[in-house]
Image: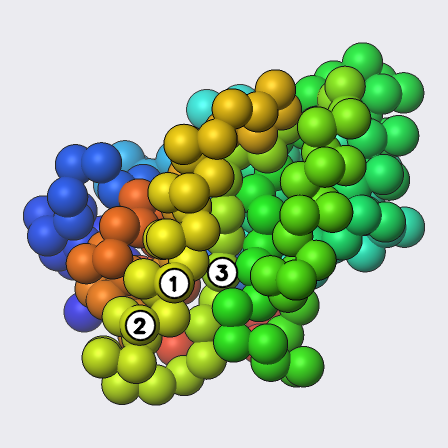
Amino acid sequence: MSISENIIKLKEELPKNVTLIAVSKTRSVDEIKEAVKLGMHDFGENKVQELIDKIDCFDSSIRWHLIGHLQTNKVKYVVGKVYLIHSLDSVKLLKEIEKRYALNNLTANVLIQINIGKEEAKTGIYLDDLPELLEEIEKCKYVKAKGIMTVIPKGNYEENCNYFKKVNDIWLKLKNEKYTNISMDYLSMGMTHDYKAAISQGSNMIRIGEGIFGKRNYNNNN
């Protein structure tokens, strides 16, 4: 199926409250423009340099999401450039975001990335460390946590649902707490191969790459 056919199909089947992010990493500007013509305006990138290179090719109507791991030394490059940082996973990163956004008198909207499967190969904070991070977010003046993001271990539909339910339970618990800098607006979970399970467990933001653009082309540097 073509990019346009994939987007039309997804939009028809997704609940109205679910935000569809087109994961455009490794994709060309022309491919992204094709998606824009179909009404897409949320795009997700993994790498800061690729994100910055693409931003200048589009107007301000596009909302860019940084969905990959953000190194502290790269934070300065995304200030004022992204709609949402999906990958806050440590107090160290939080403090760097706070510092860099303060210098520009801007507010960073972030999601807390939770490593629900405790996979060493994946980034994200472990649940044991979450209370400390929440406490530190509350001290910030230039960072607002807007929800949770997760990438779960590979598994079948039932296993996926179990992991997504655990994250949704955390999200709902935090949603009912009274914070100054933390609001659970977004639950970003679900990708091409598991988004249906994610939506069944309360996700309101999914990140689809292959399901829109087809198989990735890692040789494409546009």
Q: Amino acid at mark 1?
A: Lys
In the picture, the quarter occupied by the C terminus is: bottom right
3 or 1: mark nearer the eye: 1
Query: Residue 59 appears at what percent x and percent y?
Result: 53, 26
Q: Which residue is mark 3?
A: 150
Does any portion of residue 111 appear in the rendered image? yes
Q: Amino acid at mark 2?
A: Asn
Camera-side residue: 107 or 178? 178
2 or 3: mark nearer the eye: 2
Camera-side residue: 126 or 155? 126
Rendering colour mode: rainbow
Camera-side residue: 111 or 212? 111
Query: Residue 11 appears at what percent x and percent y?
Result: 17, 47
Q: Which residue is mark 1?
A: 166
Q: Residues within 10 Å of mark 1 (few under 14, many from 20)?
A: few
> Residue 199 is drawn in which quadrant?
bottom left
Report, in whole angstroms, how far the alpha carbon at label 3 lies from the one at label 1. 11 Å
Q: Residue placed at 41% from the left, 32% from the top?
A: 176
Q: Amino acid at mark 3?
A: Thr
Q: Mark 1 touching mark 2, by CB under 8 A?
A: yes
Query: Residue 95 appears at what percent x and percent y?
Result: 85, 38
Q: Which residue is mark 2?
A: 162
